[in-house]
Amino acid sequence: EPEVTQTPSHQVTQMGQEVILRCVPISNHLYFYWYRQILGQKVEFLVSFYNNEISEKSEIFDDQFSVERPDGSNFTLKIRSTKLEDSAMYFCASGPRGTNEKLFFGSGTQLSVL
Amino acid sequence: QKEVEQNSGPLSVPEGAIASLNCTYSDRGSQSFFWYRQYSGKSPELIMFIYSNGDKEDGRFTAQLNKASQYVSLLIRDSQPSDSATYLCAVNPNQAGTALIFGKGTTLSVSS
């Protein structure tokens, strides 16, 4: 079965550093998402991406965050200057037709900001 | 503020029993509703989705939706220890929106 692939599985960084989290969505999907989950808390929406542009973003997704689909297969989340509170599990998800139907989640990147 | 509420649990049931998980949502215009299962340290995995009022069955799982009461539930029949996980209710607030709103999840523990 096709799956969403995320790399790295773990990322440790120093506060203020830039990180890039990478995702390869399922190839025929059209909608892409980033979610995050702080330990013990709910899964929170960050941003959705469709037709090569952001379609929706949450209040969490401020100017420190950006997304890119640089080559038609990869989907990246960049955090420009990490803060301690950015420590979380970051999930990439993709779907063929948006959130009215099934979303496939990647296995996540655990980001630790020291 | 659009909210999805779940009891955090833990909900403990013996093996073979029925587990009943509940969820309420605040946006009356919500269109589609999802139940995800999440094992500790893993990503959410879709179990069921439901769009219309009533029941939807898939194997041991039944999702129930009551839009008038803004209430979604998940029943797990013949619960197994492998069903022990956190169950996340997620709601698509409206057709134009693309962001799923997740509840905090209910932790289910099935004892053998």
Image (cartoon, coloured by chain):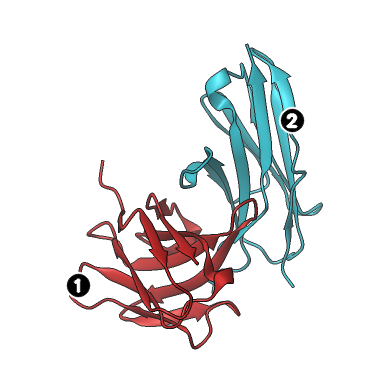
Chain colours: A red, B cyan
Q: Look at the image and tell me in which quarter the N terminus of chain A lies.
A: top left
The residue at the point 46 percent across, 81 percent down is A16
The residue at the point 24 percent across, 68 percent down is A74
Q: In this image, A4 relative to A86: left or right?
A: left
Question: Looking at the rendered structure, which numbered label has been put on residue B54?
Answer: none
Chain at tag 2: B
Q: In this image, A103 relative to B51: left or right?
A: left
The residue at the point 60 percent across, 80 percent down is A59
Question: Around disc 2, counting alpha carbons within 10 Å, would you say few (fewer than 14), some (14 to 19), or many (20 or more)?
Answer: some
Q: How many tags in the picture?
A: 2
User: Residue A109 sits in which quadrant?
Assistant: bottom left
- Whether marks 1 and 2 lie on the same chain: no
Badge 1 marks a residue whose secondary structure is: loop
Residue B14 point in image, percent of width and height = 70, 15
Q: Is residue A14 visible?
A: yes
Q: Nearer the viewer, residue B22 or A6?
A: A6
Above or below residue B3? Residue B39 is above
Mark 1 or 2, closer to the camera: 2
User: Residue A72 sits in which quadrant?
Assistant: bottom left
Q: Which residue is mark 1?
A: A72
Residue A31 point in image, percent of width and height = 37, 67
CA separation, marks 1 and 2?
Answer: 44 Å
Q: Nearer the viewer, residue A15 or A37?
A: A15
Question: Looking at the rendered structure, which numbered label has been put on residue B11?
Answer: 2
Badge 2 marks a residue whose secondary structure is: strand
Q: Nearer the viewer, residue B7 or B55?
A: B7
Chain at tag 1: A
Residue A11 point in image, percent of width and height = 38, 61
Q: In this image, B24 relative to A16: left or right?
A: right
Question: Around disc 1, counting alpha carbons within 10 Å, would you say few (fewer than 14), some (14 to 19), or many (20 or more)?
Answer: few
